[in-house]
Amino acid sequence: MARISSLADAVAEHVHDGDIVALEGFTHLIPVAAGQEIIRQRRRELTLVRMTPDIVYDQLIGAGCAAKLVFSWGGNPGVGSLHRFRDAVEHSWPRALEIEEHSHAGMANRYVAGASGLPFAVLRGYVGTDLPSVTETIKPITCPFTGEQLTAVPAINPDVTVIHAQRADRAGNVQLWGLLGVQKEAVLAARRSIVTVEEIVDELTPMPGAIVLPAWAVTAVAEVPGGANPSYAHGYSERDNAYYAAWDEISRDRERFADWLQEHVFADIAGSVA
């Protein structure tokens, strides 16, 4: 059952060195504050999993938290490359980074398999790509009923999944709505989960298109208003486009990035990246 706690306590208890950690959210509800708390607590040797790693993963990689990245697309959305990610891959700074690349469909199906208690997922994917030649976790499989050649990918079962949502009630039931990704599947596939929310309320009122993660599926809930910034939380905040543009320049330079980490993460100062 979910326990209400501070974000710092939740990360300290549930995110350990060497863990497989998934921070999911698509365009909005990205758990940026939680990612920065992982940096602040100096976790190391993490395998980071995310369908679309963006600037919070750039920050985690640049801070030396990651040993491996499992993903399907990476970039600063609407701006360009992730320069800390590129520096790790191309120059092993601040450390070497192993990468495991999949398609969006492959990653989504891996989460579904993990949430379903299955060892792998099967899909009609990767045909015509060279991903199977560079990614060992993509294998051909023959359908036993039709003989069709398909592709198998292993389930993802993170040690801990972290997401952001709009609200939770005091029992730990979590409600999120708007543009959703694979948050539900990523939480259900994980051994532990941390959910940051905009607010904790007495009762979850129905919202169009909302989903509810029951308290039994969540390990810890932390109230963190603005915890998705610079992404947005539908109904609570807007996307900070200037932050993404500013990040491109900050992340290009190792020294400037280190200064930003010290000022905005280790000093626990929220706000603009400029």
Image: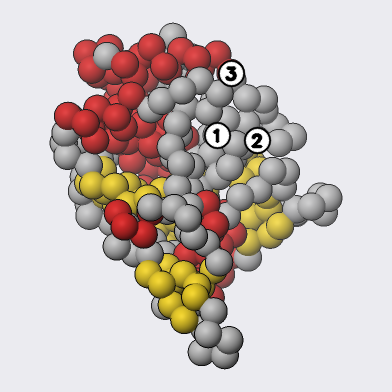
Under mark 1, the amino acid is Ala
Residue at figure coordinates x 49%, y 75% from the top left: 149
Of circles 2 and 3, the one toward us is 3
Secondary structure state at the residue bearing disc 1: loop
Q: Residue furthest bottom?
A: 145
Nearer to the camera, 211 or 114? 114
Of the numbered discs 2 and 3, the one sitting upstream in the chain is 2
Kindly report the distance in space between the C-alpha atoms of the residues bearing marks 1 and 2.
7 Å
Above/below status of 243 relative to 179? above
Which residue occupies 23% across, 17% down?
254
253 displayed left or right of 76: left
Amino acid beneath label 2? Ala
Counting from the top left corner in percent of width and height, residue 61 is at 29, 35
* CB under 8 Å between discs 1 and 2: yes
Could you tell whether 136 is left or right of 121 in the image?
Answer: left
Q: Which mark is residue 228?
A: 1
Q: Amino acid at mark 3?
A: Asn
Of 78 and 43, the residue lying toward us: 78
Question: Regarding mark 3 in the picture, which secondary structure is present there?
Answer: helix
Using the numbered discs, state the Cα–Cα distance from disc 3 to disc 1 in whole angstroms: 13 Å
Whole-percent x, y for residue 248 in the image: 41, 16
